[in-house]
Image: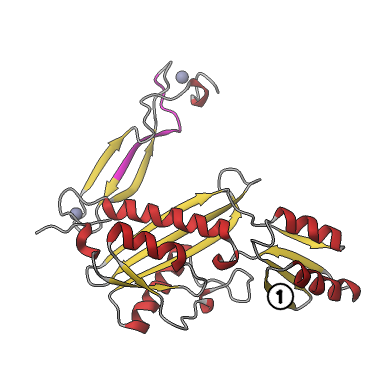
């Protein structure tokens, strides 16, 4: 007897968030998978690390998402949990660009299934800057999409988060600048203060849906996903293997079945510009 994506239909999932991520995750999971998402009241996720660094994250981004989901299961006694975790920093391939990687993890304790949706984007306002004048601050704020996007002011040991009003921002800055305290402005990356990030969480949720719908051809378990990739797409002129992707290998966590998919990029040959012989 195989499984299918209806495994999740009409089940209740707890979402471990205190930053209103349910606003985007809830409707997508309801519409696409028939899952009812609830947020446990007073669920504190800040012990798992915060963006403003009062607490460091205990593990990798995926481990952190898993810990949140496990905690939600323990606290509520539910069997299905959703957790989301984001990270910000230089783009892995273009380090001059800031990037945001969002993960949305679905944990099904009843069927021992863990599926992670991901979305990597350079659409982010992630930035920080030392501020010496109000003029500098307003320029930064403008670039960061303030006041629709929140800001954080750091000065000495104190930090004021979730600033979404110009007057509030100016008051906080003035107090510090007058006392000649070194001030740093940062974008507030918490989802409820950052609509750009919220949009990327929605993208990651859609990726999760796609992965849930990808079922193992042998046993039907949802979450049949790429486990390895092989490079070597041949050059279109001389057929030398290039660094571009040739094959994706999909695997099932349940039964171990694997399947190869050739030419995942849709092209059977690489442009000579990628070739070590034609364009060394
Ligand atoms: Zn070539
Ligand atoms: Zn399988």
Q: Is 200 one of the magenta-colored residues?
A: no
Q: Is residue 124 left or right of residue 39?
A: right
Mark 1 surroundings within 10 Å by alpha-carbon count, few (fewer than 14), some (14 through 19), many (20 or more) = few
* Image quadrant in which the C terminus is located: top right
| Residue that appears at 77% across and 66% down | 184
Closest to the observer: 222 or 172? 172
Q: Is residue 41 left or right of residue 109?
A: right
Q: Is 243 one of the magenta-colored residues?
A: yes
Image coordinates of residue 128 in percent, x first then y, are 72, 60
How does the figure colour the protein chain or chains? secondary structure
Q: Quadrant of residue 147?
A: bottom right
Image coordinates of residue 161 in percent, x first then y, are 67, 73
| Residue that appears at 50% across and 55% down | 200
Q: Is residue 260 left or right of residue 278?
A: left
Closest to the observer: 51 or 278? 51
Above/below status of 99 relative to 75: above
Q: Quadrant of residue 172?
A: bottom right
Above/below status of 273 relative to 254: above
The span shown in magenta is 239-249
Residue most extreme to the top: 237
Closest to the observer: 50 or 16? 16
Image coordinates of residue 140 in percent, x first then y, are 76, 57
* Image quadrant in which the N terminus is located: bottom left
Above/below status of 219 relative to 172: above
Question: Helix, strand, or loop for circle 1?
Answer: strand
Residue at the spot of label 1: 160
| Residue that appears at 74% across and 64% down | 185
Q: Quadrant of residue 159?
A: bottom right
């Amino acid at each position: 007897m195989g499984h299918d994506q209806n495994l999740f239909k009409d089940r209740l999932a707890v979402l471990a968030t205190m930053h209103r991520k349910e606003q985007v995750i809830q409707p997508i999971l309801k519409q696409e998978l028939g899952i009812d998402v609830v947020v446990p009241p007073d669920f504190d996720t800040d012990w798992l690390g915060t963006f403003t660094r009062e607490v460091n994250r205990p593990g990798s981004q995926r481990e952190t998402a898993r810990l949140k989901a496990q905690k939600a299961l323990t606290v509520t006694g539910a069997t299905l949990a959703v957790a989301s975790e984001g990270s910000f920093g230089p783009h892995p391939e273009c380090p001059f660009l800031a990037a945001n990687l969002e993960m949305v993890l679905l944990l099904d304790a009843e069927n021992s299934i863990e599926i992670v949706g991901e979305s990597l984007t350079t659409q982010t306002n992630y930035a920080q800057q030392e501020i010496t004048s109000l003029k500098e601050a307003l320029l930064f704020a403008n670039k960061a999409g303030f006041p629709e996007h929140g800001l954080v002011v750091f000065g000495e040991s104190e930090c004021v988060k979730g600033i979404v009003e110009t007057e509030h921002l100016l008051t906080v800055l003035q107090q510090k600048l007058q006392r000649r305290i070194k001030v740093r402005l940062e974008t507030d990356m918490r989802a409820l203060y950052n609509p750009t990030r919220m949009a990327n969480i929605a993208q990651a949720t859609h990726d999760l849906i796609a992965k849930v719908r990808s079922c193992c051809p042998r046993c039907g378990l949802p979450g049949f996903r790429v486990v390895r990739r092989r490079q070597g797409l041949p050059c279109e002129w001389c057929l030398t293997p290039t660094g571009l992707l040739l094959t994706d290998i999909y695997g099932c966590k349940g039964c171990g079945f694997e399947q190869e998919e050739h030419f995942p990029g849709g092209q059977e040959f690489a442009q000579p510009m990628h070739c070590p012989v034609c364009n060394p």
